Image (cartoon, rainbow, N blue to C red):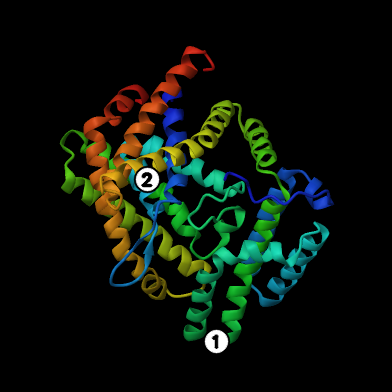
Amino acid sequence: MTTRDIVFIALFAAIMAALAVFPPVMLPLLGVPITAQSMGPMLAGGVLGARRGGLAMVLFLALVAIGLPLLSGGRGGFGVFFGPTAGYLIGWIVAAVAIGWMTERVWHRLNYLTACAICVAGGIGLLYAVGVPWSAAVANVPLSAALIGSAPFLPGDVVKALIAAAVIVTVRRSYPLIPRSAATSR
Amino acid sequence: MLSDLHVPGNSPVHRARPGVKLALLAVFCTAVFILDDPLVTAMSGALVALGYAAAGLRPRHAWTSLRPALWPLVIVFLAQLVLADAGTAMFVTGRFAVLILAASLLTLTTRAVDLTDSLRVGLERLSPRIPADRIALAVSLCLRFIPLVRTVLEDIRRAQWSRGLERRPLALLVPLIVRTLRTADEMAEAIEARSVE
């Protein structure tokens, strides 16, 4: 891990924090506000790769845990890890690592479609695979009920995955970071 | 903008070592979950209330820590009401409230700096192989980056607004990432040139 890696990890943890104050987009049909923050794990994984992307999420959540109000809506502090939706926060780490890992695998032939597939699989599939059973377990509700409860966020998350994929592909063109890191860290 | 949620004070709860508070919190929350009993939850709720009183915190502070979790809690309450009964709904929701309030007590009475310091010391003691100085570097860099990224985002938003592009997420995110990555690269070079490494 070079100084450059550490600086990038710190940067993406900070970008996560900035996404919390990004103007929320309203979904026209459902009226569910979608905040930009959950795009962070996709961007971190897709731009930095598995290792640095995952560590950026760990750093961000550590800063939240020590009491900085960096989650959207100004939430923060140790308490957020004990709420019913804490699984999604932990899921961000899993999602960033998975998206980073998949992006590294297809880096040389990454296009918008593969990036979309990666973001949907990691940022929605895996994220929900952690978050839904977690909230079912801590809230004592059956899995199906937790799944229904998370359904309103699905359309927004799909939109975010599509945007994140476009960002990843565009940034790759002007600022490719993954191959160089693969050469130095392995 | 980057103030933590700490409420200054000089009570025994404030003065207790952050590491001790963290360990107590871990034991407390695990116990509440494992024992899984309404009576235990009620008692631990009383214990948390006692902790808030001992720290000289007002109900207003408890409310500010609970308020962000309000909607998820209401949803959980309603789900339990439908799936089980009112008693279970009260128990499950109450347990969340107790756990969140207990964890917030740590945040409210401990400065973020002290928590980071004790975390660093704890990590160093845990294993000499953990690069504690690098973790400290990452934390301080991130604290520096947060206001920077927000400023850059505001700049880009103004620029794209003048082009009529302020509603296009791509027109904001791509320049934000590319521009801050460049800054990060320069910063990494500066750090290495000064041999902070």
Of discs 2 and 1, which sits in the foreground?
Answer: 2
Asked whether the viewer can see residue A2, the reply is: no
Question: Residue at the location (39% across, 58% down)?
Answer: A24
Which sits in the foreground, B80 or B154? Answer: B154
The quadrant in which residue A129 appears is: bottom left
Q: Amino acid at mark 2?
A: Ala
Residue A158, image x, y percentages: 27, 59
Pick whichever, A84 or B128, lies toward us: A84
Count residues near mark 1 (Cα–Cα under 10 Å), then give few for <14, some for 14-19, many for 20+. few
Look at mark 2 in the image and give the residue it sits on. Answer: A96
In the displayed structure image, the side of residue A161 where residue B134 appears, left or right: right
Chain ID, mark 2: A
Relative to residue B105, is residue B143 drawn left or right? left
On the picture, is B23 further left or further right than A26? right
Q: Quadrant of the C terminus of chain A?
A: top left
Residue under disc 2 on the same chain as residue under disc 1: no
Chain letter of disc 1 in the image:
B
Q: Residues within 10 Å of mark 2 (few under 14, many from 20)?
A: many
Residue B60, compared with residue B79, is above or below; it is above
Give the vertical position of A26 relative to A113 (above or below): below
Q: Residue at x 47, y 83 (%)?
A: B83
Residue B111 in sight from this viewpoint:
yes
Q: Are marks 2 and 1 in contact (CB under 8 Å)?
A: no
Q: Does B16 appear above or below A25? A: above
Q: Amino acid at mark 1?
A: Asp
Residue at figure coordinates x 84%, y 51% from the top left: B12
Q: Quadrant of residue B57?
A: bottom right
Q: Which residue is mark 1?
A: B85
Residue B120, above or below B44: above
Q: Position of residue B23 (x, y in %)?
A: 70, 49
Residue A34: x percent and y percent? 37, 61
